Image: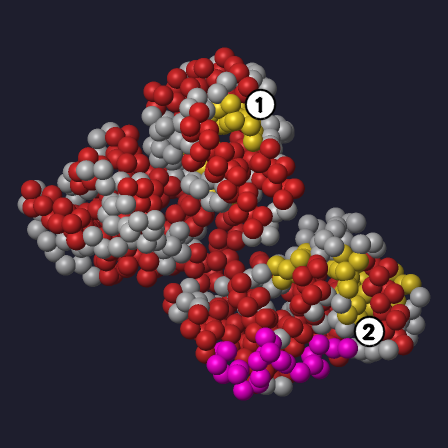
């Protein structure tokens, strides 16, 4: 409706309609809540108004609180959505929430304060605060259990789940779902309520546990819930506070429950995990802002091509099909085409079995992927992605051929994970329409997409790639061209330290256990086995002869065909048809033999040292990539590692973690590691500069390159 935040009002037959209009998502900021509170009070004071309908403009009810406000100190003069909800709670009128689009966080809490809730078929409701390391702080933990039961409410909030309209009605979150005008339906609902139950505050309901459980089962439910979430210091801080808040809804009267919720909410807001998760939230929203990029209209990608029908190429094809973009996959080997077709069929059938697709939708998506051996079929594609074997000469040969086939205004992209994009662009006549699109395996599941621009990549090509990432539901991070780009260049240092620790006698299973305890999704050696040790062998070859450790252990495993999960043995051993890694003492003996051949003496290492050597290796290399301009911002690196490599989100990513523990402390440990383990630990200039002035990476975000040479 309006570019200026406002609450629009109109009256109809004794009902006042309040329309939230604060583009783009009708955020319930402190400033906006002040205006909303004034309109609620005005409605309460108007004798002609018998009921109030609260709705949203712009096809959305509200996205909830303004996350920026969580960093703002609340004073007695501050108006929050809690004040609005309190005014509704104590008001005399009937309130109806008319929900179109999303009602998340504080927005759902606002709707829960209403007597009735009506939604469109597009409505989606949820309390996702846990994803920011928070709990609902405007009555959600007290009202939702009263509405749908304590156990279902707790499960919904712990998952941060968003619930679609029909399911929300089934659970009792919505009173009705309508196909037409939701405001008209809400007004009619209010008018019917005049005759039956004009006020029906959720706060007055009795809390039931849910799932047919009796009240005496509450302590058991609470205790089990605490056991099922991670410890507070391992990323579960907000989850435990949420469980305590829901328990308060059952144990305390409503006003005291609200007070308990607010105290627990404030603890979360001030916690390190929440600061880290809010950093990730904002960092993700900064990704598309490329300093110095000329404004350019993105090209429309209406069709795509993929060269290669291996696991990666097929996964990329499925990704495009899921986004509604037809894709042609070129593969010369008939047997590989058959395997790829089976993969496509199996993936879409799995989605049908999970209830995520109908049979018809799966059929449509499957048919949008066409396999062929003829490269000429790619001639009219808007974008063609190469996904062949990771070999520079082979990739250059592929692009030289594609350049003569694919129409001149189309974009060519490589899915390489480490190789030189500029060298590939040189064999084409369109370097301005060439870039890297590094999907992560499995491509149809992993959210990260590294977008690698060369020096001649045009602004329009880059803008197209950034928009395409969103279309594909990927998190696109722009990187300059350099060996390994952001993620794999840093991974090389992380892997190096893991291998060196094993050479020093620290068993792979212990390294993995320690780093998983830190919060990573998996340890480095389990990751090597999952990706394939042959992949890391090829990475070593592309790194100019550098090895991941001091010994030839990777060569030895590669030559012995110990390639990881795919061969049933690697750094671990695997039972037939099992992906569960089992300790393999034979590998430990191989490490010992290789270490002895170079006179590397066994040594002890604490858990703290293991974490520092792996994580600080990431930080030091990340600082170098910032200083060299490969990565634009510290937050970009953090997003790469959280979405692509399983870095624990509650630590905010490697660069945020450096700020959290203190860049100066990291620097001093890196200096110590350089003295003890060698020059590969030499601190990057940017790390040294920030440490010496006792600064942070967050403070150096946009001027990192200048700072590195100061």
**Of the numbered discs in the image, which one, if any, rests on residue 167?**
none
Among the 4 quarters of the image, the one containing residue 422: top left
Residue for point 34% across, 49% down? 577
Q: Give the residue number, with chain letter if any, for mark 1.
A: 381
Name the colour scheme: secondary structure
In the image, is residue 566 part of the stretch drawn in magenta? no
Work out whether residue 678 can be spotted.
yes
User: What percent of the width, then of the height, locates residue 301?
Assistant: 60, 29
Q: Is residue 215 magenta?
A: yes
Can you give x and y, in whole percent of width and height, for residue 459 in the image? Answer: 55, 28
Report whether 524 appears left or right of 349. Answer: left
Q: Considering only order in the chain, which callout, 1 or 2, is on the residue closer to the N terminus? A: 2
Given this view, does label 2 or label 1 mark the residue nearer the observer? 1
User: What range is drawn magenta here?
Assistant: 200-222
What SS does tag 1 mark? loop
- The image quadrant that residue 155 belongs to is bottom right
């Amino acid at each position: 409706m309006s570019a200026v935040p406002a609450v629009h009002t109109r009256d109809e037959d004794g009902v006042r309609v309040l329309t939230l209009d604060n583009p783009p998502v009708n955020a319930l900021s402190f400033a906006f809540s002040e205006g909303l509170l004034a309109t609620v009070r005005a409605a309460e004071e108007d004798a002609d108004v018998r009921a109030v309908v609260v709705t949203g403009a712009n096809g959305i009810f509200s996205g909830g609180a303004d996350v920026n406000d969580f960093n703002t100190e609340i004073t007695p003069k501050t108006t929050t959505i809690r004040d609005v909800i309190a005014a509704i709670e104590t008001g005399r009128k009937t309130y109806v929430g008319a929900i179109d689009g999303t009602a998340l966080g504080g927005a759902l809490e606002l709707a829960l304060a209403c007597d009735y809730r009506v939604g469109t078929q597009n409505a989606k409701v949820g309390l996702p605060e846990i994803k920011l390391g928070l709990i609902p702080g405007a009555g959600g933990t007290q009202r939702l259990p009263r509405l749908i039961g304590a156990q279902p409410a707790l499960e919904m909030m712990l998952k941060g789940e968003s619930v679609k309209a029909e399911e929300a009605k089934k659970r009792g979150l919505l009173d009705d779902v309508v196909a037409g005008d939701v405001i008209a339906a809400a007004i009619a609902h209010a008018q019917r309520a005049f005759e039956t139950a004009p006020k029906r505050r959720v706060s007055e309901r009795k809390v039931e546990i849910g799932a047919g459980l009796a009240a005496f089962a509450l302590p058991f439910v609470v205790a089990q819930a605490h056991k099922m979430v991670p410890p507070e210091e391992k990323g579960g801080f907000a989850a435990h506070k949420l469980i305590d808040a829901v328990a308060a809804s059952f144990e305390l009267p409503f006003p005291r429950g609200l007070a308990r919720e607010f105290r627990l909410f404030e603890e979360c807001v001030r916690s390190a995990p929440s600061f880290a998760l809010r950093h990730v939230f904002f960092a993700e929203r900064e990704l598309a802002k490329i300093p110095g990029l000329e404004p350019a209209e993105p090209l429309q990608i209406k069709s795509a091509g993929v060269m290669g029908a291996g696991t990666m190429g097929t996964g990329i094809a499925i990704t495009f099909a899921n986004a509604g973009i037809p894709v042609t996959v070129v593969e010369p080997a008939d047997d590989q085409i058959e395997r790829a077709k089976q993969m496509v069929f199996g993936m879409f059938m799995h989605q049908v079995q999970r209830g995520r697709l109908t049979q018809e939708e799966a059929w449509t998506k499957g048919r949008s992927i066409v396999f062929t051996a003829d490269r000429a079929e790619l001639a009219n594609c808007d974008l063609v992605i190469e996904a062949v074997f990771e070999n520079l000469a082979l990739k250059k040969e592929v692009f030289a051929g594609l350049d003569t086939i694919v129409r001149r205004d189309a974009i060519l992209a490589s899915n390489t994970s480490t190789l030189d994009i500029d060298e590939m662009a040189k064999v084409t006549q369109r370097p301005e329409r060439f870039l890297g699109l590094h999907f992560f395996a499995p491509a149809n599941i992993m959210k990260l997409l590294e977008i690698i621009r060369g020096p001649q990549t045009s602004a329009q090509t880059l803008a197209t790639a950034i928009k395409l990432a969103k279309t594909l539901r990927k998190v696109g991070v722009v990187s300059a061209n350099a060996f390994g780009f952001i993620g794999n260049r840093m991974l090389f240092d992380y892997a190096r330290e893991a291998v060196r620790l094993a050479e020093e006698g620290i068993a792979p299973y212990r390294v993995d256990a320690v780093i998983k305890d830190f919060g990573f999704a998996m340890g480095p050696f389990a990751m090597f086995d999952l990706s394939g040790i042959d992949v890391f062998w090829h990475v070593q070859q592309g790194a100019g002869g550098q090895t991941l450790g001091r010994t030839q252990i990777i060569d030895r495993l590669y030559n012995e065909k110990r390639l990881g999960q795919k061969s049933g043995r690697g750094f671990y051993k695997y039972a037939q048809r099992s992906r569960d890694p089992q300790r393999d003492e034979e590998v430990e003996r191989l490490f010992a033999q290789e270490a002895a051949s170079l006179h590397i003496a066994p040594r002890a290492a604490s858990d703290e040292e293991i974490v520092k050597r792996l994580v600080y290796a990431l930080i030091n290399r990340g600082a170098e990539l910032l200083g060299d301009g490969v990565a634009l911002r510290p937050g970009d690196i953090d997003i790469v590692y959280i979405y692509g490599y399983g870095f624990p989100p509650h630590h905010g990513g490697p660069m945020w973690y450096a700020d959290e523990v203190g860049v100066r402390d990291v620097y001093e440990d890196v200096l110590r590691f350089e003295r003890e383990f060698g020059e590969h630990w030499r601190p990057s200039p940017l790390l040294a500069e920030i440490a010496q002035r006792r600064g942070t990476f967050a403070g150096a975000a946009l001027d990192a390159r200048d700072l590195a040479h100061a």
